[in-house]
Amino acid sequence: MQEPRPNEARASSAEPERTAAAAAAAAFEEVYLLYAARLRKIAVRKFHIPIPEAETLVHDVFATYITHAASVRKVEPYLIGAICNAARRYLQRADAADALFCGESPCAATPGDALLDEIARKLLLSRLLAGSGSRCRTLLQRYYLNGETTDAIAETMNSTPGTVLVFLHKCRKRALAAYRALTERG
Amino acid sequence: MDEHISEDELALYAFSPNAVSPERRRAIDRHISACFSCRATCDFFAVAEEDLGDPDVWERTAGSATLEALTAYAERIAEEDEEAEELLKPLLGAPAKAAWKNLLAEKRYRTGGVVRQLTNHAVRIDESDPLAALTFADAAISIAEALPNDLYPSGAVNEIRGRAWEERGFAQSKLGEFKEALESLDHAERMYKRLASPGFSLGNLCTSQIS
């Protein structure tokens, strides 16, 4: 049998390490995608923290979480408690925390049912988008997230704004079909 | 009940009700107030229109700077831990060797992963062999203190420093060195307070001080 070349041998011996690290990153990504939106909403809606600062707080919470993730037994209360405390500290620094208190149990900023419903709905929608075709996803992303006009999209597609509107409608209908399939299955 | 409203018309009604004639609008209103299926479809279109503009909905597919940075950080931590585990294998079973070896002098030992592995090992043995645990905690502290403050984002290097000091305090208390233990725990508290998100670590420290 042919001996592997030195580079190949090194690559294959390093492979398990890369895989384990990639698995750790993937596991973290799943936790992040499950909770980041909720933490942002808590910071912005419950504590009225400006969006860019809320993003920094969410980053700080997850950056600290990563260093001791193994010792966190219940991720959800940990993260919600952490964003409450981070938001409170932010407001204290901004001298605006008088009316808000988060040291109680449960935290006064624990999200209410309406907020939780909205987050669950958006989480479902984000999964639908992830599972939808790339053409629809790109089109919806350009229109809704990037805020491009139908005129601008039509120009790059060598099409007309009317056709773009039709495509958008078809994509929404596809999302509806996927939503129905998912909710009926669930 | 009259016939279901088509999805196309419900979508139009949801996005721009004014595009539907007043008479037809009234008919749709009447129908969806009684038809659960058409109301659900109409609600989906109306809500999706609003939800699709929320960047959170797109993070899973479009990514974000925060997600990218944090995922890379999580991967780096896992890599550091794996490397440190390999590196420390010969030392973890031999506390005397660890005590005499100047880990700080060798660059390969000056990583956050080595600090975490040494501290974790100290935690594992602190009940059965507190003296050895103290040795490993001291080794962890010597490296942790030498690491740059900006090693990790959000001041997270202070978490591993704090944990090493906390473990030192725990081992000292097991050895009856209570005054020194208290000093170590104070040191751990100071480290944790430098974290951007210190609640969990301070809470744990508080619990361990009580117990």
Image (tube, coloured by chain):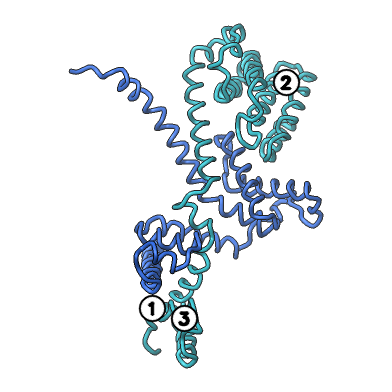
Chain colours: A blue, B cyan
User: Compared with residue B37, is residue A182 higher up or lower down, i.e. above or below?
Assistant: above
Would you say residue A1 is visible in this rendering?
Answer: yes
Closer to the N terminus: mark 1 or mark 3?
Answer: 1
Q: Chain of mark 2?
A: B
**Disc 1 marks which residue?**
B8
User: Compared with residue B94, is residue A11 higher up or lower down, i.e. above or below?
Assistant: below
Which numbered dot is residue B13?
3
**Disc 2 marks which residue?**
B173
Dot 3 falls on a residue whose secondary structure is helix
Say which quadrant the N terminus of chain B sits in: bottom left
Say which quadrant the C terminus of chain B sits in: top right
Image point (43%, 35%), residue name: A22
Circle 2: is it few (<14), some (14-19), or many (20+) Cα within 10 Å? some
Task: Tell me the CA gap for discs 2 and 3.
Answer: 71 Å
Image point (36%, 67%), residue name: A174
Image point (68%, 58%), residue name: A46
User: Compared with residue B108, is residue A118 higher up or lower down, i.e. above or below?
Assistant: below
Q: Quadrant of residue B143?
A: top right
Q: Quadrant of residue B171?
A: top right
Dot 1 falls on a residue whose secondary structure is helix
Task: Tell me the CA gap for discs 1 and 3.
Answer: 9 Å
Circle 1: is it few (<14), some (14-19), or many (20+) Cα within 10 Å? few
Three-letter amino acid code of the residue under disc 2: Ser
Closer to the N terminus: mark 2 or mark 3?
Answer: 3
Three-letter amino acid code of the residue under disc 3: Tyr
Dot 2 falls on a residue whose secondary structure is helix
Q: Chain of mark 3?
A: B
Q: Are marks 1 and 3 on the same chain?
A: yes
